Amino acid sequence: MENQFESQAMQGNMPLSTNHGAHEILDVHEVLSASIGAMNTFIFLRPHVQDQELLNILDRQYAFMLDEYNITAECFKTGQDPSHPTGSYKMQMGNDTKYGLTPGQPKKPMQSANEINDAIISGFLLSCHKMGATGKTTAALESTNPVVRRVLQDSIQNCIEMAYELSLYQNKNGYYQVPQLSPQDMQAMLNMYGQADKAKDMPN
């Protein structure tokens, strides 16, 4: 069996289930472990949610994350296409962002578990997606198995979309404020870059 495996590897005919590099194995292991941690966080926090809108977001995102975890684990184990393609998360709120800062109390860590509220919960959920996007990007860049790489890269945009949905929820409720530069500084930054021309020695 060992000689057969070595022969297949030398001929570039390695079985799909073992067609993974070491970096990929370790990084996808971290991705799947983080996904479990994120879903556990969603379950743990769900009973403490007060706002029905946040509860709907949590439930919708959890169901999507669960399916995405399963197909990632499936293709990682088999090295082949999962039972169905990666879906595309569709948030159910507008893209409007409120800009500007309103003075308020300084933020600081909780001193008691009784202080938990929707602002804190939505922050936890948002952090899960930010960590997921970072971890999946790292793993995708290290993946040698083409199926695993594709599933991961398709999943990254879903992490971004779910994070965006939560950030919009936070912004709408005043939990996350978005400052802006002065009009003059903003215009100066926007005009700082121009269109590039092709270098003379580069082919068409």
Image (tube, rainbow, N blue to C red):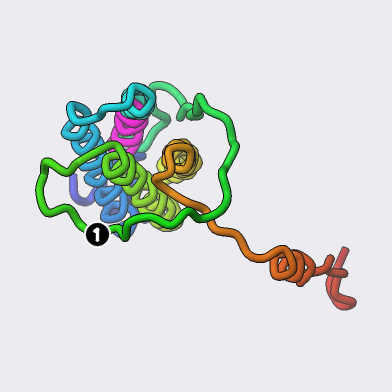
Residue farthest toward the bottom in the current orientation of the protein: 201
Q: Quadrant of the C terminus?
A: bottom right
Q: Is residue 27 visible in this depiction of the protein?
A: yes
Q: Quadrant of residue 1 in the image?
A: top left
Residue at image point 42% right, 30% down: 81
Residue situated in front as seen by the camera: 103 or 53 = 103
Q: Residue at x 39, y 45 (%)?
A: 175
In the rendered image, residue 67 lying in the magenta stretch gets the answer yes
Is residue 190 covered in magenta? no
Residue 116's spot in the image, x, y percent?
Answer: 19, 41
Per the image, label 1 sits on a secondary structure element best described as loop
Q: Main secondary structure of the magenta part?
A: helix
60 w.r.t. 42: above or below: above
Residue 82: x %, y % from top left? 39, 28
Query: Residue 114's spot in the image, x, y percent?
Result: 11, 41
Q: Which is nearer the eye, 151 or 66?
A: 66
Segment tinted magenta in the rendering: 65-77
**Where does the image place residue 111, in percent across and percent down from the top left?**
12, 54
**Residue 103, quarter of picture:** bottom left
Question: 10 Å neighbourhood of mark 1: few (<14), some, or many (≥20)?
Answer: few
Residue at (47, 51) in percent of width and height: 177
Q: Nearer the viewer, residue 112 or 12?
A: 112
For the point 85% across and 75% down, the residue is 199
Q: Which residue is mark 1?
A: 108
Q: Residue 72 sits in which quadrant? A: top left
| Left or right: residue 195 compared with residue 18 | right
